[in-house]
Amino acid sequence: MTRGLMWSILGIFLAVTITSTMDATGLLAFSALPLFPLIVLFWFLQRFSRIETGFVWGVARPYLLAMLYPLLVTGILVLTAAMSGAIGTAHTDWRKAGLNLALVSVSTVLVAIITEEGFFRGWLWASLRRTGMQPIWVLVASSLAFSLWHWSAVVFDTGFNPSPTQIPVFMVNAAVMGAIWGFLRWISGSVIVSSVSHGFWNGMAYVLFGFGKKAGALGVANTALFGPEIGILGLALNAAFAVVLFLWWRRAQAVEMASPNVASEPHHTRGRLASPVS
């Protein structure tokens, strides 16, 4: 086992253990915060650059994809729920809901950069890449670690607490969402891009559809079907988006490599959708 892989395993173990302990003691609201000192610690110990960890702005186009993901998936869920008569908004204060959506989205973007995205798509991604692991397997490993890190939020009495039948759906969905954000990080080279997507996802999912047993602005009660994170339809749409994103990117790469000008371009200008560290 290489030293880089040992660092990765140790980091995941510490992240899961610390967060699980906090979730088990009623500190869910703060349980992501220890990821920040872990990022700083392992970044220092392994001597990463900002580019390796993705703490760069990246280019513009991936930000459009980052916004498209939550808008498209939650939009389809809202439309489907409306068509099935599952929405009840008679008592919804839309002004308050809009303010909450903006607040949750922006605050999550800022916090995710130095916690979830900075750890899983930043430090862990860089640590696994340093072992020589190919990006596709880094994507898989970091997404599974991201899902594992969430287990305590749905198992302990945290206030989220989906039904037992929804827990497997949530865990699989967490891995799929982690893969989408990991892919955004891969093609952009930036955890800021994935953080933007993560933030707007949380804002739209939690404000519109609720969190745990608390109903969202749409008043959808059947979250086992329509829930973006704990619903069957949410899982299906997330998986479909992940597959389409991968196929689109692979086709874009094939077209780019077939371009007669690509061989003559400087390395740093090629592959505007490709990560500079992949």
Image (cartoon, rainbow, N blue to C red):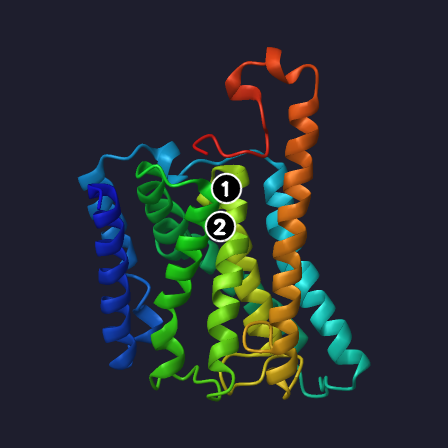
Q: Position of residue 111 (x, y in %)?
A: 40, 56
User: Could you say which quadrant of the image residue 19 lies in?
Assistant: bottom left
Kind of element beneath mark 1: helix
Kind of element beneath mark 2: helix
Residue in the foreground of this view, choosing between 115 and 20:
20
Q: Amino acid at mark 2?
A: Gly
Q: Is residue 103 visible?
A: no
Residue in the foreground of this view, choosing between 52 and 50:
52
Residue 233 in the image: above or below residue 116 = below
Q: Which residue is mark 2?
A: 182
Going 65% across and 79% down the picture, which residue do you hit? 226
Residue at far front of view: 1
Q: Position of residue 172 (x, y in %)?
A: 50, 70
Q: Is residue 70 visible?
A: yes
User: Could you say which quadrant of the image residue 240 lies in?
Assistant: bottom right
User: Could you say which quadrant of the image residue 133 lies in?
Assistant: top left
Residue 94 in the image: above or below residue 115 = below
- The span from disc 1 to disc 2 (Cα, nearest Å) is 6 Å
Q: Assess whether mark 2 and mark 1 are in contact (beta carbons under 8 angstroms).
A: yes
Q: Using a 10 Å C-alpha cutoff, classify the residue at mark 2 as few (fewer than 14 neighbours), some (14 to 19) or many (20 or more).
A: many
Q: Which residue is mark 1?
A: 186
How many discs appear?
2
Q: Amino acid at mark 1?
A: Trp
Q: Position of residue 217 (x, y in %)?
A: 63, 79
Residue 278 in the image: above or below residue 1 = above
